[in-house]
Amino acid sequence: MSVSIPFNKPFLTGKETEYIEKAVRTGKISGNGYFTQECQKWFCDRYGFLKTLLATSCTDALEMCAILSEVKPGDEVIVPSYTFVSTALAFVREGADIVFADSYPDNPNIDADAVEGLITERTKAIVPVHYAGVSCDMDKLRSLADKYSLLLIEDAAQGIDSHYTSPLTGKRSPLGSIGDLAAFSFHETKNIISGEGGMLAINNDRFIRRSEIIWEKGTNRAEFFRGEVNKYGWVDTGSSFLPSEVIAAFLMAQCESVDNIQSRRKAIWERYYQRLAPVSAKGCFNMPVIPDYAENNAHMFYIVCNGLEERSALMRHLKEYGILAVSHYLSLHKSEYYKDKYKGGELPNCDRFADSLLRLPLFYELTDEQVDYICDTVEEYFG
Ligand SMILES: *Cc1c(COP(=O)(O)O)cnc(C)c1O
């Protein structure tokens, strides 16, 4: 079989090199220049964040969240086990103990009803992950955070341009705007990209000043450049979290095309859903579930197979037909790095997604014919 459909292919809008050239020609290619500030403003204007800071990755944005949250050894942070390493690692680096939470039975997101039982006197923060860009139950998590005076930090790595609608108030909020802090990723596998890249969004004004200092190696350099202080120096902890203008220029081109990117991704997602729902109805696998309060930003199309063996066999079948479908996270509480430190109980839903979730190719240039071919191949496998 000569067909070859990759799992992902980074999409270029065509403006990236023009903007990079502009950044290079201005002679200012380190961080926090024109394109960085334009991007940061664009995100605040479009999504209503109080402040944003571009970062070199979502992992770095999460590390800034961990520093800002002032977690210390002995403090606890509640994180889903079904997530990428960085969600937990950022807090582990500050010395926190991770309390892993399970997923819902029908949805990989953190089971908000199970979170209250995990809160102790040492808990400092809850870090929900909007898996596949589908919102967690933010009303429940926000009210738990308020009730116990915890920080709510959104890992919105996959959540750009997606929303949560409160069943209580009807208010529709962009993901990343509900937590005190939020982290986004622009890694080449995400919806809008800059190769490697990320962003910290700040929605609680008490973090505004300190976030900028942490971002600039623990100095008040950003204030100095705005003329707010007449010299700058070392005032706090921090690191070099800011990306160069070359990266920000690339990202600006992507931002300007977000509506175009999103509409194509959503069309692909819908086509998968329409084609595969009847196969799923025969009991072959489960379809993704999007709760009423959540929206779909078409970050990912996945199916949930009936177990590890079936998933492996289906993956092999697809590969024989030139289609690269891939599994996703292994449970973090069972990881080599954390399993001996983990003190909690079994997390069966998380383990089930680790064994049985299968992601199908989804990228801008995937054609309708290719989606149909992939669906036909899945259907053929189930006979
Ligand atoms: C991609 C991803 C990250 C890491 O993003 P980077 O920009 O690669 O650091 C973190 N959390 C989740 C849920 C992700 O999907």
Image (cartoon, rainbow, N blue to C red):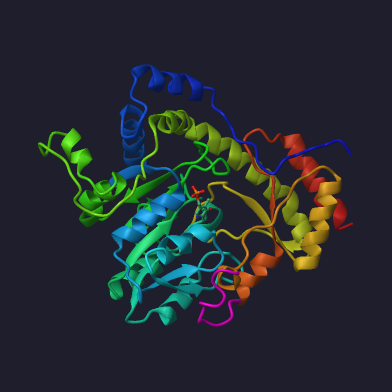
Which residue is at 27% across, 54% downward? 237
Q: Which residues are magenta?
A: 336-347
* Image x and y of residue 251, in percent: 45, 33
Image position, residue 269 (x, y; %): 64, 45
Q: Nearer the viewer, residue 194 or 181?
A: 194
Q: Quadrant of residue 166?
A: bottom left
Q: Please count the marks in the image.
A: 0
Q: Using the image as rendered, state which of residue 19 and residue 297 is in the foreground.
A: 19
The one nearer the camera, 197 or 162, is 197
User: Could you tell me which quadrant the C terminus lies in?
Assistant: bottom right
Residue 280, image quadrant: bottom right
Judging depth in this view, the residue of 21 and 317 nearest the camera is 21
| Residue 263 screen position, x and y as percent | 55, 37
**Apparent side of residue 50 relative to residue 248 in the rendered image (left or right):** left
Asked if the stretch drawn in magenta spans residue 12, the answer is no
Residue 129 seen in this snapshot = no
For the N terminus, the image quarter is: top right
Q: Residue at x 29, y 75 (%)?
A: 147
Q: Magenta: predominant secondary structure element?
A: loop
Q: Residue furthest front?
A: 234
Left or right position of 250 against 236: right
Horizontally, residue 304 falls left or right of residue 373, namely left
Say if the magenta span includes residue 346: yes
**Do we see residue 364 in this rendering?**
yes
Asked if residue 277 is positioned above or below residue 270 in the image, the reply reads: below
Position in image of residue 258 (x %, y %): 48, 35
